[in-house]
Image: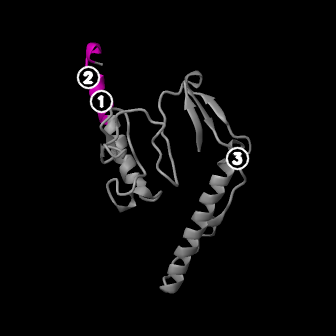
Amino acid sequence: MTKEFNNGKVTFQKDLNTNVERGNKNYMDFLDSADAYVERNGLDLPEEPSARDVLADPECMTNPILELDLTEAGITSIVWATGFALDYSWLNVNAFDENGKPAHQRGISTEPGVYFVGQAWLSRRGSAFIWGVWHDAKHIAGHISTQRTYSAYRDASQR
C-alpha cells in the first residue's frame, strides 16, 4: 500500500510480501472451491496442476522499490490498483460525487484522463474480479484510443 504521495514522489510501505501472500492464499482458496465444485457435481474436467505452482519471488519482491521520484523516472500516468478497501484520498481531482464515490460512466470519469476499473458492478457483476475486469479495461482502452485519434485531428491551438 502507498504510504505517501507528495511533490511528485511516492513512497511505499514495507508490506508487499504480506499482501502478495494474502492474495496467493485467496487464489488457492478459490482453486479449492472450484475443485470441490467439480468433484461435488461429478464434472469430467482435466486436472490443471500448474495452476497451483508457486514461483520463486522475483527481485522486485525480495528487494522492492520503497520510494520513487515520478518526475525523475519520466512517469506521467499512474494506474493505481487497490484491494481490500477503497481509498481515494490521494487522488486530488474533480472525479467524485457528493458522497466521495467515483463519478463515471462505465469507468470513464467526469475528469478527463481519469478512469476507474475493478469497481463492484462497474458495468457487470464480474467487474470487481480479476477474471471479469477485462471487459471494463477493454472498454476504457477503446475510449482512450478514440480520444487519442480525435486529438490527432485537432490543430495545435486546440490541444
Compute the Cα span from label 2 to label 1. 7 Å
Which residue occupies 30% across, 23% down? Answer: 152
Residue wearing tag 1: 149
Residue 90 in the image: state x and y as whole percent: 48, 37
Amino acid at pointer 2: Tyr
Compute the Cα span from label 3 to label 2. 43 Å
Amino acid at pointer 1: Thr
Residue 63 in the image: state x and y as whole percent: 73, 41
In which quadrant of the rendered view does residue 116 lie? top left
CB-based contact (under 8 Å), mark 3 and mark 1: no
CB-based contact (under 8 Å), mark 2 and mark 1: yes
Q: In front here: 95 or 147?
A: 95
Which residue occupies 31% across, 43% down? Answer: 98
Secondary structure of the residue carrying numbered label 3 = loop
Q: Which residues are magenta?
A: 146-158
Q: Which mark is residue 58?
A: 3
Residue 109, relative to residue 54: is it above or below? above
Q: Is residue 13 magenta?
A: no
Is residue 46 visible in the rendered structure shown here? Answer: no
Residue furthest to the front in view is: 98
Residue 25, relative to residue 70: is it above or below? below
Residue 125 in the image: state x and y as whole percent: 36, 62
Residue wearing tag 2: 153
Amino acid at pointer 3: Pro
Q: In front here: 93 or 73?
A: 93
Q: Is residue 148 magenta?
A: yes
Secondary structure of the residue carrying numbered label 2 = helix
Q: Quadrant of the C terminus?
A: top left
